[in-house]
Structures are given as C-alpha cells and as structure tokens.
Image (cartoon, grey):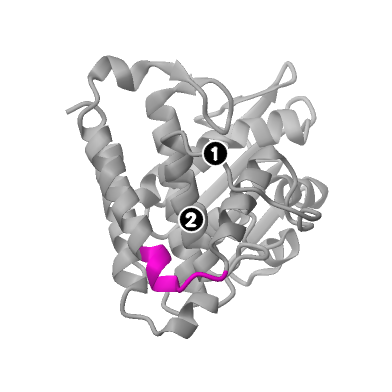
C-alpha cells in the first residue's frame, strides 16, 4: 500500500491519544496544555475540527475578537472549531474524534498511489498529498505530547510519529540557518541530537544558501548539542528560546550570537 507508514503513524498517534485520555476523569479535560490558550479538551476539539474540515465542513461561526495566540487564518479556523466545543463534555469530544479518525484512516487506506502524489492544498501551501499527510502526523504527534504533558504522564516511547516529526524538523534547519537567520557566508552549523533517533546535522552557508556539510575541516562556527526532546519542543514552540539555551542538557560551543539567533528562529510550526 502506498505510504502505509504514514497511515500507521497516524493510526498509532490517534490511538495513543484515545488510550491516554479515555480513562481520565472529567476534570482532566480542563487541564492546561503547553499549547497556548488550549486545554486538553481544546486540543481534542482542534484535531476533530481539522478532520471535519477535510471533509468539507465549514468552520463554526465565531463572534468577538480573536485570542492573542491566534495569528493567521488557519489559527482562526482552528480556534472556531475549538470554541464550538469548549463547553461540551470532554468524553463526547473524544468519542467524536475517535469516529472521525476511524473514517479518515479508512479513506486513506483506499487511496491509490497516484492520489498520494496529487498536488493540492495544505497548511504549508500547495504540496503533494503525502507531504500533507506527514503534516497531519506532525500536528497530531505534537498534540499527543501536549496532552501527555498536561496530564503529567510523559512517555519515553513516542511511537512511529516521532521519526516523521524529527525528519521534518531536521529538513527545516537549512531554511532556519540560511533564510531566517541569514547566517554569514562560510558559517557552519553542527547540531548534535541525543536520545531516541539521535543524529548529527551539519550545514554550511554557501552563496547565501544553507547546504549540507557532511564533513567539516575545522570546528563549526556554532555547535549545539541537545536532547531530541528539547529540540522538537523548541521547534514546535512549546518551550522558549531561553529555556532551550538555558537547559542543563543543552551545550553551546562557538558563536553565542548565532546560538541566540538559532534558538529564536527554531520555532517553526504554523
């Protein structure tokens, strides 16, 4: 089956959310998550709303000013769905989400290989459908961790979605280093990630672009060593630049100004 690994990652991530939340008491749905302004119920409502939106459901009406954490049209759509369920019993939202996810997985399993390659809308702009589905994994997996953190039930085994998330955040580093930071010509970056899915990423600035640098002849202009969990939390905007740089597990060597700029620009989720 085409892109079965994406379907498996969505299935496992959504199932993990259901397994985690279903045994919780009603009060747990009101627990605040690291996602600004959102409770556990709100996160579930967002995931539900996105699945409904993909089937053509219009965003619910919303009156009044948008909250300060809403910054763009996608955020407005998300908030409208969240607001619509804000006072519903949490278990009702969870049941609706489970049904919606089951329908979505069935629809994905029925796609042809050509349909997975089709170019169309995604939150990042026009993208192949498989890229869009990776984004759904990214969003759902990060929100699973939001719920785990809110309920004080973190886990070390994060399932198949974690690799997709880290691959996406690794792929974004050239954009951060070259375009957002505009690192100086010739400047090199080495990021060492420790823990599950540990890896080393090396980049150099060449003609204004960040390009892979598999071997460095001298120490990098900036070398950052940090655990995988801190890295994705900063990329997802779940911890601040100060918290990322100040963590005892983060080690910075080289240009401190570039380190500050990197930490500031690493927050890349929409």
Q: Nearer the viewer, residue 63 or 41?
A: 63
Find numbered disc 1 in the image and state the secondary structure of the residue it sits on: loop
**Label 2: which residue?**
142
Camera-near label (2 vs 1) is 1
Q: Quadrant of the C terminus?
A: top right
**Label 1: which residue?**
58
Answer left or right for 27 relative to 110: right
Task: State yes or no: residue 91 in magenta.
Answer: yes
Instruction: Report the span colored magenta.
Output: 87-94
Answer left or right for 26 relative to 205: left
Q: CA distance from mark 2 to mark 1?
A: 25 Å
> x%, y% of residue 133?
39, 35
* Res. 16 image quadrant: bottom left
Q: Report the magenta stretch's main SS.
A: helix
Task: State yes or no: residue 242 in magenta.
Answer: no
Q: Earlier in the sequence, mark 2 or mark 1?
A: 1
């Amino acid at each position: 089956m085409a892109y079965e690994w994406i379907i498996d990652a969505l299935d496992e991530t959504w199932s993990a959310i259901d397994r985690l939340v279903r045994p919780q008491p009603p009060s747990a749905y009101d627990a605040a998550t690291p996602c600004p302004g959102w409770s556990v119920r709100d996160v579930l409502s967002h995931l539900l709303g996105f699945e409904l939106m993909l089937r053509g459901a219009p965003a619910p009406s919303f009156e009044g000013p948008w909250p300060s954490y809403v910054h763009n049209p996608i955020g407005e759509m998300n908030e409208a769905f969240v607001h619509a369920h804000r006072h519903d019993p949490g278990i009702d939202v969870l049941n609706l989400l489970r049904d919606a996810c089951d329908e979505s997985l069935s629809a994905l399993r029925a796609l042809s290989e050509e349909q997975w390659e089709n170019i169309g809308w995604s939150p990042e702009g026009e993208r192949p459908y498989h890229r869009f589905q990776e984004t759904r994994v990214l969003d759902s997996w990060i929100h699973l961790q939001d719920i785990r953190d809110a309920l004080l039930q973190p886990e070390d085994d994060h399932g198949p979605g974690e690799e997709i998330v880290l691959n996406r955040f690794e792929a974004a580093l050239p954009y951060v280093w070259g375009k957002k930071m505009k690192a100086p010509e010739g400047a090199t970056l080495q990021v060492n990630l420790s823990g599950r899915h540990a890896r080393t990423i090396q980049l150099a600035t060449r003609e204004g672009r960040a390009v892979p640098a598999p071997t460095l002849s001298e120490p990098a202009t900036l070398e950052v060593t940090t655990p995988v969990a801190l890295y994705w939390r900063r990329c997802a905007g779940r911890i601040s630049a100060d918290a990322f740089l100040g963590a005892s597990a983060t080690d910075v060597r080289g240009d401190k100004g570039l380190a500050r700029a990197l930490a500031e620009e690493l927050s890349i989720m929409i």
